[in-house]
Amino acid sequence: MKPSTHFSLFVALFLALSPVIVSAQETHEINAQARVFAPDILYVQPGDAIQWVNMAVGGHDSVSIEGLIPEGAEPWRSQIGENFGITPTVEGVYAYVCEPHIGFGMMGVIVVGKPVNIDASMAFAQEKLQGPYRRIIGKLLKVQQDAKK
Ligand SMILES: [Cu+2]
């Protein structure tokens, strides 16, 4: 084949695949229910969008837990009652709480790609977290166990 034929094939292949690449980014919803997030553990791929919905009824927020997101990732804090979204690209485990309902254990974990920081997150949670924040440890444990399967 001539080099120009190679190039044409490459262009044709790229055009054929590019819609697939774009549509591979999914949007995932986390539904704020009475005192829980559903699902409370969510697995996504880097670049996927995450939306917290139904936040106004009951007055929920989503606040990342300091020390429990991957290094280099952006922490977040939504307004109470606001539907809110993030699109994390840094791989790893992210933990968050609903501050008004933290006493009910209203919190969750998002795993972006592989849970590369799960052991460090678990160690941090066990050493540093106080009071109701410690209820995230059970969810981290589940992620840790799933990662070993
Ligand atoms: Cu809440």
Image (cartoon, rainbow, N blue to C red):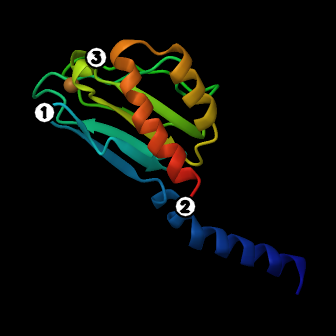
Q: Is residue 111 visible?
A: yes
Residue at far left of view? 57
Mark 3 — residue? 99
Mark 1 — residue? 34
Relative horizontal placement of residue 109, taking residue 70 as reference (left or right): left
Relative horizontal placement of residue 48, taking residue 39 as reference (left or right): right
Where residue 53 appears, as percent x and y from the top left, is: 22, 37
Q: Which amino acid lies under the numbered mark 2 shown in the image of this protein?
A: Ile
The alpha-carbon separation of the residues under discs 3 and 2 comes to 36 Å
**Circle 1 SS class:** loop
Contact (Cβ within 8 Å) of mark 1 with mark 3: no
Relative horizontal placement of residue 87, taking residue 30 as reference (left or right): right
Residue at far right of view? 2
Q: Residue at x 38, y 41 (%)?
A: 50
Mark 2 — residue? 21
Confirm or reject: label 3 Cβ below 8 Å from ligand 1: yes
The alpha-carbon separation of the residues under discs 1 and 2 comes to 37 Å
How many residues crowd around disc 1 within 10 Å: few (fewer than 14), some, or many (20 or more)?
some
The number of callouts visible is 3
* Quarter of the displayed picture in which ligand 1 can be seen: top left
